[in-house]
Image (cartoon, grey):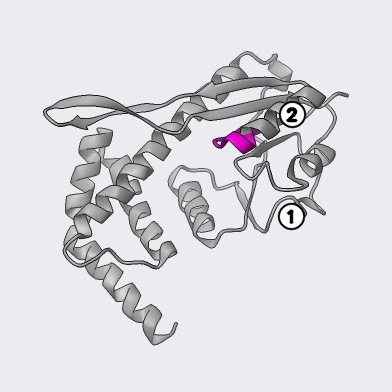
Amino acid sequence: MNIGQFAFQRQVENLYVDHNAWLRTLLRRKLGNALDAADLAHDVYLQLMRKGQLPPTGESRRHLTQIANGLVIDLYRRRQIESAYLQALALLPEPCAPDEETRALAIEADEGRQLLIEHNRDALGVPGLQLIRGTAPHALNGLEAPDAIFIGGGVTRDGVLDTCWQHLRPGGRLVANAVTLQSEMTLMAWREQHGGELTRIHVAQAQPLGDFDTWRQALPITLLEVIKPL
């Protein structure tokens, strides 16, 4: 660690000491429980460290609130996706439902997101999740053919969908999401060739608007689910 990195780390530590109790209280009011608030407060400082940029003087709490609001929206969005996925699993025939011995691999190239994956793995009690530091689709090479693949982003990148489809076992399930028009068009074109079901998820959070409250929409997520023929 060089002098600049050390100084930056100390400044982040000072922000933590000065504002963490306030930030956790803010998040607890938004989320309704202390455990999620503590996790997201931790993620706020991880994101600060990943970006390597401190808030302007005198605007620390405004800046921290901005990051926290984005993480809260991401949390609600993720839970909505998880809920929709669990509902879909509940409709599967019993032999197709995953059992306790099912393994999960996560491929991620970004160092900051790798830290978040490891934090969430440990915090949410999924010790069997194996993190592979690499870039899809190349990181799939040499891995055992999976029964299911989830693509959380990057479907417009050349080769991602095709390579994942080739590696997937016959009868396996591919799920990919999109938040941009370009990635949504890619999923729609893929559906024309391979079939599958499209689902769109909308999440809104109540936020103040003057003396009233209104719904603030998060970006809608489009999900494509495809079963590879046997």
Q: Amino acid at mark 2?
A: Ala
Q: Residues within 10 Å of mark 1 (few under 14, many from 20)?
A: some
Check residue 129 in the rendering and tell me which mark sits there, or answer none: none
Which is nearer the eye, 193 or 28? 193
Of residues 60 and 36, the one nearer the viewer is 60
Indicate which label's residue lies in the foreground, 1 or 2.
Answer: 2
Which residue sits furthest bottom? Answer: 3
Question: Which quadrant does the N terminus fall into?
Answer: bottom left
In this image, 73 relative to 160: left or right? left
Q: Secondary structure at mark 1?
A: helix
Q: In the image, residue 186 lies at what x, y percent?
A: 69, 34
Q: Residue at horizontal 45%, vertical 42%?
A: 124
Q: Earlier in the sequence, mark 1 or mark 2?
A: 1
Q: Position of residue 203 (x, y in %)?
A: 41, 26
Q: Residue at x 20, y 25 (%)?
A: 213
Residue found farthest to the right: 230
The span shown in magenta is 175-183
Does the CB distance between marks 1 and 2 fall below 8 Å? no
Against 91, is 54 above or below?
below
Quarter of the figure with residue 226: top right
The residue that label 1 is drawn on is 139
Residue 133 within the segment the image draws in magenta: no
Compared with residue 219, is residue 115 higher up or lower down, i.e. above or below?
below
Q: Position of residue 222 (x, y in %)?
A: 57, 28
Residue 12, percent from left and from top: 29, 68
**Residue at x 36% of width, y 26% of height:** 204
Determine which residue is flagged by label 2. 189
